[in-house]
Amino acid sequence: MSAENRNGEGNPEASEGIQPKYRRSFGCVTWIYMATLAFLAAVSVLMMPFWFFGDFGVFSLLEGPSLFATFLFVPAIVTAAMLGARTYRSERKIATRNGTYIGTVIGWLGFTSIVWLEVNQAGASILSYIFIPLAAISSALILYALFRGEQESGRKLVAASAILALVGGAVVLALDGSLIVAAGAVVSAISGAAGGWTAGVGYARAGGKEMLPPGIVERPRRRPTR
């Protein structure tokens, strides 16, 4: 191989390196790792008061969010890769806000899905099956809002998704009847918000200047004056 080929001088594609959209895709995947860590850290911290005022057995509730995070990890990576490859960067305030909303819905819906499995294993009423269509439609709306890209309609879709998830989850928690499990669902939702906020930070950064929307120029950061 010649020195020219090794250096990429004779190959325009090699000299350009990885395309910006793929670098953004990789960046979004990396931030999913960060979001997962933020989610699990928030769950652990928020469960501490229940342990302090209750007993050590309350940490069994950690199994639900941990299992939920494990199941969603690979699909979340695939979704982040696809989303990063086809979207531009956005303002950090908008990205973190939207990420917080979506993370809250996912955290709530994920925990109540596990509760639904436990409730039905114990032989719940037919009323519990209301949860299935509500959860399915809510999840579909979240995915559609993510890939749609239009901010205003995206917020409306997320709001509709949140209402469906809230109603479905409330039915499941009412059938379970345990206050500690209901508290676990709230903890999972708050932790999902923390994870979603973290993912939003990455969404606003991944791809660098090359992935800014057309016609947008990144404003230079002001250095703090002493």
Image (cartoon, grey):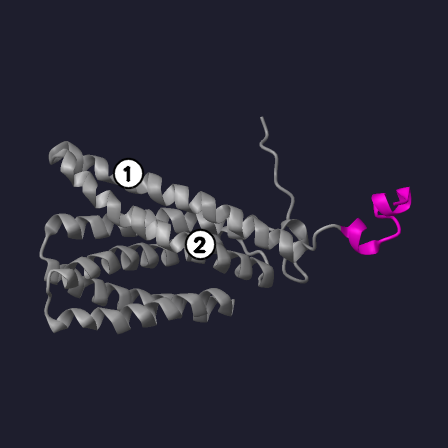
Segment colored magenta: 1-16
Q: Callout 1 environment at 10 Å: few (<14), some (14 to 19), or many (20+)?
A: some
Residue lying at the far front in this picture: please name it: 1
Please state, as top left, top right, bottom left or bottom right, where the C terminus lies in the image: top right
First-in-chain label (2 vs 1): 1
| Residue identifier under label 1 | 44
From the image, give the main secondary structure of the stretch colored magenta: helix
Q: Say what amino acid the circle numbered 2 marks.
A: Val
Residue in the image at 19% along x and 36% along y: 49
**Helix, strand or loop under label 1:** helix
Give x and y (percent) for residue 194. Answer: 37, 46
Q: Does 148 appear above or below 14? A: below
Left or right relative to 40: residue 153: right
Placement of 45 over or under 21, stated as above or below: above
Residue 33, how many percent across, how many down? 46, 45
| Residue at position x 50%, y 67% in the image | 147
Residue 80 seen anywhere in this rendered image of the structure = yes
Task: Determine the image quadrant of residue 88.
Answer: bottom right
Indicate the quadrant containing the N terminus: top left, top right, bottom left or bottom right.
top right
The answer to whether 188 appears left or right of 95 in the picture is left
Q: Quadrant of residue 216?
A: bottom right
Residue 185: give x, y in percent of width and height: 22, 52
Query: Magenta span has 196?
Result: no
Q: Position of residue 120 (x, y in %)?
A: 15, 64
Instruction: Please indicate whether residue 199 sits to the left or right of residue 216 in the image.
Output: left
Q: Nearer the viewer, residue 190 or 133?
A: 133
Q: Mark 2 points at which residue?
A: 74
Q: In this view, does 26 lie above or below 224?
A: below
Residue shown at the point (67%, 62%) measured from the top left: 214
Residue 180: which disc?
none
Can residue 2 be found in the magenta stretch? Answer: yes
Report the residue that reaches farthest toward the top: 226
